[in-house]
Amino acid sequence: MKYLLIIFIIAVALAPLRHAIPSRRQRRIARMREYAAVHGLFVEFRQLPGAARGDKSRAELPRGDIIYYGKRLPPQRGDGGRRGSWAQENHDWRALHGSGPLPEALAQSPGDILAASVDENSCGIYWQETGDEAAVEQIREAIEAWAGTLGR
C-alpha cells in the first residue's frame, strides 16, 4: 500500500511536466522553421493578403496559424514600386489589389500555399505548415528563383 501511495504522489508531481514536452507536431514545425532559417528564409506570423480589405469572407479564411516564409530583398533605388500579392484557390492563382501577373517562379509551387506577396523588403509565401522539410525545400527554391528575378 505504501508503494502505491508513493507511485501516486510521484505521478501527481510529474504530471505538470508532461505539458512542457513538445508534441510531434510542434517538433515537426520547429524542424521546418529551422530548415527555412538555415537556408536563408525568415519565418513570421502575418495576416493573409486580402483578408484585411475584405477580399475573402470570414468563412473562407483558413483556420489556424498563417505563417509567412520570406526572403529579404536588397533595398531598391527609385520609387520602390515593388508591391504585389496573389492568392491561390484550388491550384488557381489570382492577383489581388491590381497586382501584375503571377511571377513565373510561383507557378510550380506546392498546392498548399495560400498566398504570395512582395513588397519593398521581402518576397514570400503564406501557408499553414502542412508539409515537412521537403515542402519547405520546394518553397525555398520557388522563393529563391522569385527573388532572383526581382533583383534585376
Image: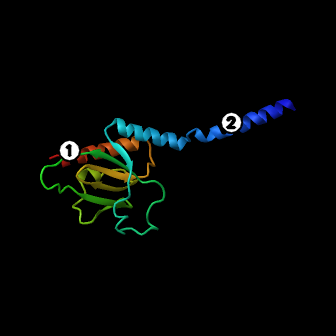
Give the residue number, with chain letter if any, for mark 1. Answer: 74
Residue 97's image quarter? Answer: bottom left
For label 1, the crowd category at 10 Å Cα-Cα, with few meaning under 14, some 14 to 19 and many 20 or more, is few
Category of crowding for the residue at label 2, using alpha-carbon neighbours closer than 10 angstroms: few (below 14), some (14–19), many (at least 20): few
Between residues 91 and 53, which one lies in front from this camera angle? Answer: 53
Q: Secondary structure at mark 1?
A: loop
Q: Are marks 2 and 1 in contact (CB under 8 Å)?
A: no
Residue 91 picture location, percent across and down: 36, 59
Q: Is residue 25 left or right of residue 16?
A: left
Along the horizontal axis of the image, is 26 left or right of 119? right
**Which amino acid type is marked by label 2?**
Leu
Going 74% across and 33% down the picture, which residue do you hit?
10
- At label 1, which amino acid type do we have? Pro
Q: Position of residue 128 (x, y in %)?
A: 43, 52
Name the residue beneath numbered marker 2: 14
Percent across and percent down for residue 132 are: 44, 42
User: Image point 38% across, 58% down: which residue?
Assistant: 47
Asked if 62 appears above or below 33 in the picture, the reply is below
